[in-house]
Image (tube, rainbow, N blue to C red):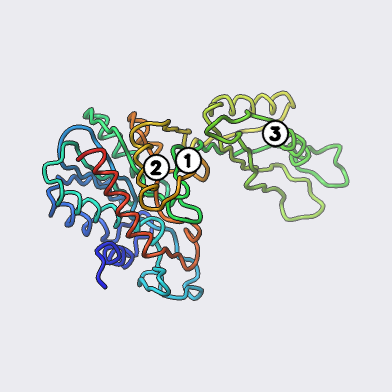
Amino acid sequence: MYCPVIDLVKQLVRCPSLSPDDAGCQPILIDRLQAIGFTIESINIGKTLNLWASRGEGKTLVFSGHTDVVSVGEIKHWLYSPFEPSTKNGMLFGRGTADMKGSLAAMIVAAERFVQSHPQHRGRLAFLITSDEEGCSINGTVKVVERLMERNECIDYCLVGEPSSNEKLGDVIKNGRRGSLTANLFVHGIQGHIAYSHVADNPIHRIVPILNHLINIQWDRGNAFFSPTSMQIANIQAGAGSNNTIPDNCFVQFNFRFNTQVSASIIQSRVEDVLNQNQVNYSIKWDIIRHPFLTKKGNLLNEVVNAIQHYSKITPKILTTGGTSDGYFIAKMGAEVVELGPVNTTIHKINECVKESDLKILSLMYQRIMEKLVS
């Protein structure tokens, strides 16, 4: 039986949109949005395609998402071709079905139904769609937000279609995300023969006890919305390939997922203080990937919860766990930001899939939120 949501997802999955290549997704979405009266603005930068589409005036509700997907890995391990959508036992298989072409299709079809029912809606409905979310995220949503802020655009509410659900559609929504800060640390020593360590300086020996100290620091206790800040070591590299040579350098990469109780600058300062106190010869480069953001209880959060209760008959957990999202950039505009999307158990995995029935219900949830906020 024909279903507009499932049909649109399949069209999008057939586009092999490996980040940042949109591969034809946005032209499909533009045609659908133009047909129902949206004004289209393409803000393309390099290989990244960005779409800003809006309809109406007044309080603004934005639906945000991305058309790009991650690599498919070893195709031979897929049950079906990753870019040829296939259905088995009610599950739709294909790269991007859950993250997040399924959400995009649900949003577009929800907007079509909404406009048909409310052609003169009182608020402004908008879409912000990028092809640079799974990659470096430097020419995507952040650039669109910069453009919007330059001309004093206002966004009141933003619903991001990231796959927030854990086991059942709507069991978890996100009202914020932790910040992400990465340290790229080079510890400098003096190379020498293992047997003559007194005339060398082993950078590995220098950094190991310091790393142990940093791991055990309690950076904060978290709060009602966020878990405590955590540090994880991602990479350690040293040595010249010889078992009798002390290396002259050691590279360590570690990441902090931090909350609103502490800032990136405080973490950086404390780490460098520890290094300096231990008289380490080092150089360090910091990469601030995202700052934390949080949306407290308001109109958007209330209506998202109400929509889930109405269609799924459950009350969602409101969490800030997981990785980063483009919601951070939109929150900088003062918007309330909430993430609601499909179950995330197969995202970025071989045989990514989503329940077709979930996408149909998700589209109804999105439509209800539109009706409550901008009808």
For residue 328, side relative to residue 346 (left or right): left
Local crowd size for mark 1, using a 10 Å CA cut-off: few (<14), some (14–19), many (≥20): some
For residue 301, side relative to residue 122 (left or right): right
Query: Which residue is labeled 3 in the image?
Result: 214
Instruction: Calculate the distance from the C-alpha at mark 3 to the C-alpha at mark 2.
Output: 39 Å
Query: Which residue is labeled 1 in the image?
Result: 318
Out of 1 and 92, give the one closest to the viewer. Answer: 1
Contact flag, marks 2 and 1 (Cβ < 8 Å): yes
Instruction: Calculate the distance from the C-alpha at mark 3 to the C-alpha at mark 1.
Output: 30 Å
What residue is at 72 percent from the left and 34 percent from the top? 216
* Amino acid tagged 2: Val
Nearer the camera: disc 3 or disc 1: 1
Percent x, y of residue 162: 40, 49
| Sequence-wise first label, 3 or 1 | 3
Q: Quadrant of the N terminus?
A: bottom left
Query: Which residue is labeled 2 in the image?
Result: 305
Local crowd size for mark 3, using a 10 Å CA cut-off: few (<14), some (14–19), many (≥20): some
Percent x, y of residue 165: 46, 52
Query: Residue 335 has which mark?
Result: none
